[in-house]
Amino acid sequence: MSMYAVIRAGGKQYRVAPGDVLRLETQATAGNGTVEFNDVLAVSASEGQITRPESNAVVTGEILNEGRAKKVLVFHYKKKKQYKKLAGHRQPFSSVRITEVTFDGQKFSAPALPKKEAKPKKEAAAHPKTEEKAEAKAAKPAAKKKAAAPKKSSAKKSTGRKK
């Protein structure tokens, strides 16, 4: 069953399903890193049936990370007036994973993500190839540097025309 909802967030509309990851405008979070979208415009519970829910529809998501988008250059220019202005802008965003869609007593949840386990740190053992290179440099005596060759003068050449 492909279940989805249409929500409004940050002045834009998004079609979301449980498990989707969206890049939205920076969202205010609850204390535990979850976000609720109460502005649900439409819900499709079964194939081909779209309903407009009453006030009881809620889409819940968890914030994965926050960041800033690539830089956009804003260039103002007025011809014949010697006016140019260049500014950069990076829009902040929040990556949100939709975890649950709830309406009319029905609840559709995304499968849980596997927990990331912290790997134990290995002892500071250097890479074998880098060890070999370091040993080779230590065994090799420093080579003498050659003196730089003098530069040739750039004399002006004639064009071959006669006057």
Image (tube, helix red, strand yellow):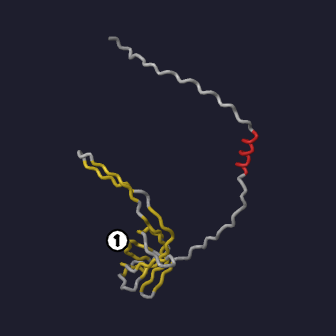
State which quadrant residue 59 falls in: bottom left
Badge 1 marks a residue whose secondary structure is loop
| Label 1: few (<14), some (14–19) or many (≥20) C-alpha neighbours in 10 Å | few
Residue at the image position 38 percent from the left and 14 percent from the top: 160
Where is residue 49 drawn, in percent x and y?
38, 80
Residue at 73%, 56% in the rendered image: 125
**Image x and y of residue 134, in percent:** 72, 45
Residue 106: horizontal and vertical position, in percent?
46, 86
- Pick the residue in front: 90 or 148: 148
Give the farthest residue toward the top. 163
Is 86 on the left or on the right of 146, as rendered? left
Image point (24%, 46%), residue name: 81
Residue 53: quadrant of the picture: bottom left
Query: Is 93 situated above or below 7?
Result: above
Residue at far left of view: 80
Q: Position of residue 12 (x, y in %)?
A: 36, 70
The residue that disc 1 covers is 11
In the image, taking residue 141 as reference, residue 40 lies left or right, namely: left
Q: Specify the amino acid type for callout 1.
A: Gly
